[in-house]
Image (cartoon, rainbow, N blue to C red):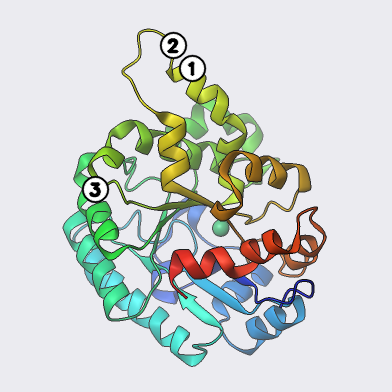
Amino acid sequence: MLKSPACPIIALEEHYWDAELAALFTGLDAGAPPALAGRLRDTGAARLADMDAAGIDIQVLSHTAPSLQKIAAADAPALARRVNDRLAAIVATQPARYAGFAALPTSDPAAAADELARCVETLGFKGAMIHGLAEGHFIDEERYWPIFARAEALDVPIYLHPAIPHPDVIEAYYKEYAKDYPVLLRAAWGYTVEAATQAIRLVLSGVFEKHTKLKFILGHLGEGLPFLLWRINNGLARPGQKPVAFRELFSRHFWITTSGFFSDPALLLCVQEMGIDRILFAVDYPFEANAPGPAWLQTVPLCDEDKAKIASGNAKRLLRM
Ligand code: MN
């Protein structure tokens, strides 16, 4: 609970590992330091005790990156059903403390759309999470739109989570620094660019003209896009561009969370650009510790009504919890 105002805290970007899926991760996606791996595997007493100590009432659980996004079409749909059934079983152990975002087999978009429907209608999940590129492809490509059509019909959001950048990007942009600063590819910068590009491409793709009620969530206070919104919109309005109402479309179709980004000035900028109703609490557990998030939210320079919206009010509305 948030102490003042007294209200529940729902955290939206909280990760775990499915043993069968995580065992398939290779290269930079594989493994984790032992303490982190232990926290990813644990969905029992230790996780709940850590939530209790931090005052987090509900975690919406999602698989960690890259989830199913690099699993080929021959295997992904059946694996997705097993992964999501196991997540549903975890949620069922603590229905008052856990909720779920589906993992989607994006390599087979029709199957992914069906799996999303199954997860929402049968398993009670709140939406889905997609991590970075799908087998090297941005998900604004039209072959993925059946997934978005289904999300719109089900009225559930899709959380766009970052993943390790494309290998060509690592080679061209980061390789000299990746050894000494492995997190440069990840939370420090690479993730941000990858996820922000994904969101920008979705706006430019025309998917929101076709699916006018589609909802996406971005973590990490919108991956920098709220700060850049004026400039992106201004640039795209220059002569010689195909017309696009970038700012309006982004503001209409995207919600953002506080995952791994507990900064007063960054939050206040997001409130000014996006509006308080579009900002939801998240930690990014276990990559970030639980305790600092609620402690920070308690102190942010916003009124009680706004704090309560971020803590859980907006999540209750968006995820119908
Ligand atoms: Mn995350």
Identify the amino acid type marked 2. Answer: Arg
From the Cβ of disc 3, is ligand 1 less than 8 Å away?
Answer: no
Q: In the displayed structure, would residue 28 be above or below residue 169?
A: below
Q: Estimate the spatial distance between the alpha carbons at disc 1 and disc 2, rounded to whole Å.
A: 6 Å
| Callout 1–callout 3 Cβ contact below 8 Å | no
Identify the amino acid type marked 3. Answer: Tyr
Q: Is residue 69 left or right of residue 10?
A: left
Residue where numbered disc 2 is placed: 238
Residue where numbered disc 1 is placed: 235
Determine whether the residue tagged by mark 2 lies in a helix, strand or loop. Answer: loop
Determine whether the residue tagged by mark 1 lies in a helix, strand or loop. Answer: helix
From the Cβ of disc 2, is ligand 1 less than 8 Å away?
Answer: no
Q: Is residue 60 left or right of residue 67?
A: right
Identify the amino acid type marked 1. Answer: Gly
The quadrant holding residue 37 is: bottom right
Q: Residues within 10 Å of mark 3 (few under 14, many from 20)?
A: many
| Callout 1–callout 2 Cβ contact below 8 Å | yes
The quadrant holding residue 203 is: top left
Q: Quadrant of ligand 1?
A: bottom right
Where residue 290 sits in the image (x, y, percent)?
A: 71, 69
Where residue 55 sits in the image (x, y, percent)?
A: 73, 78
Along the line of sight, the residue nearer the viewer: 232 or 130 = 232
Residue where numbered disc 3 is placed: 144
> Upstream in the sequence, badge 1 or badge 3?
3
Q: Residues within 10 Å of mark 1 (few under 14, many from 20)?
A: few
Q: Residue at point 58% right, 81% down?
A: 42
The answer to whether any part of residue 215 appears in the image is yes
Q: In the displayed structure, would residue 280 be above or below residue 271?
A: below
Where residue 8 sits in the image (x, y, percent)?
A: 65, 77
Q: Looking at the image, is mark 1 or mark 3 nearer the viewer?
A: 1
| Callout 2–callout 3 Cβ contact below 8 Å | no
Q: Residue at point 22% right, 61% down?
A: 113
